[in-house]
Image: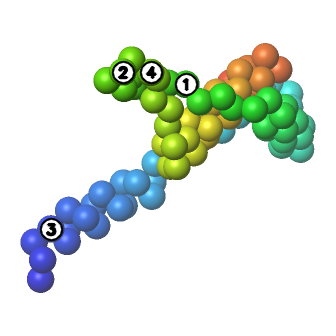
Amino acid sequence: MDSRLPSLVLVLAVAACASTPEWSKPGATQAEIDADVNACRAAAEKIPVVPRPQTTTPSGAPSYPTGTGLDAERQLVLAQRLERCMRERGYQLVQR
């Protein structure tokens, strides 16, 4: 038996119990929250994500992310836009 197994089980058990943040707004129903999340997500995706230079090449030209780096950049920008939109609508992220 692997001696790391008990530690792995403990880590998985703690991760399973961890709560995830959810959007909350006093007086809002779950249907209203879902509608606002969908509206904010749609608004965030309407604007193209322009990659920011990550590094500079030896010649001094900027180097832009590609492949999974570009995907990660896009996901981060979309998440920031969604959060800004929801906060502007009066929502807060809370642990449940």
> Tags 4 and 1 in contact by the CB under 8 Å rule?
no
Image depth: mark 4 or mark 1 in front: 4
**Label 2 vs 1, first from the N-terminus:** 1
**Front tag of 1 and 3:** 1
| Closer to the eye: label 3 or 2 | 2
Q: Residue at x 89, y 40 (%)?
A: 35
Would you name the residue on which mark 4 appears?
61
Q: Which residue is the extreme one toward the front?
A: 59
The answer to whether marks 4 and 2 mark residues whose Cβ atoms lie closer than 8 Å is yes
Residue at image position (46%, 48%) is: 18
Q: Nearer the viewer, residue 45 or 38?
A: 45
Residue under numbered circle 2? 59
CB contact under 8 Å: marks 1 and 3: no
Disc 2 crowd, CA 10 A, few/some/many (<14, 14-19, 20+):
few
Side of 69 relative to 2 (left or right): right
Residue 36, position in %: x, y? 86, 34
Q: What's the distance in space between the residues labelled 1 and 3, CA to CA?
A: 41 Å
| Labelled disc at residue 4 | 3
Q: Quarter-wise, where is residue 77 in the image?
A: top right
Rendered image: mark on residue 83: none
Q: Position of residue 1 (x, y in %)?
A: 12, 83
- For badge 3, the amino acid type reads Arg
User: Residue tagged by mark 1?
Assistant: 52
**Residue 6: x, y in percent?**
19, 68
Give the Cα distance between marks 2 and 1.
18 Å
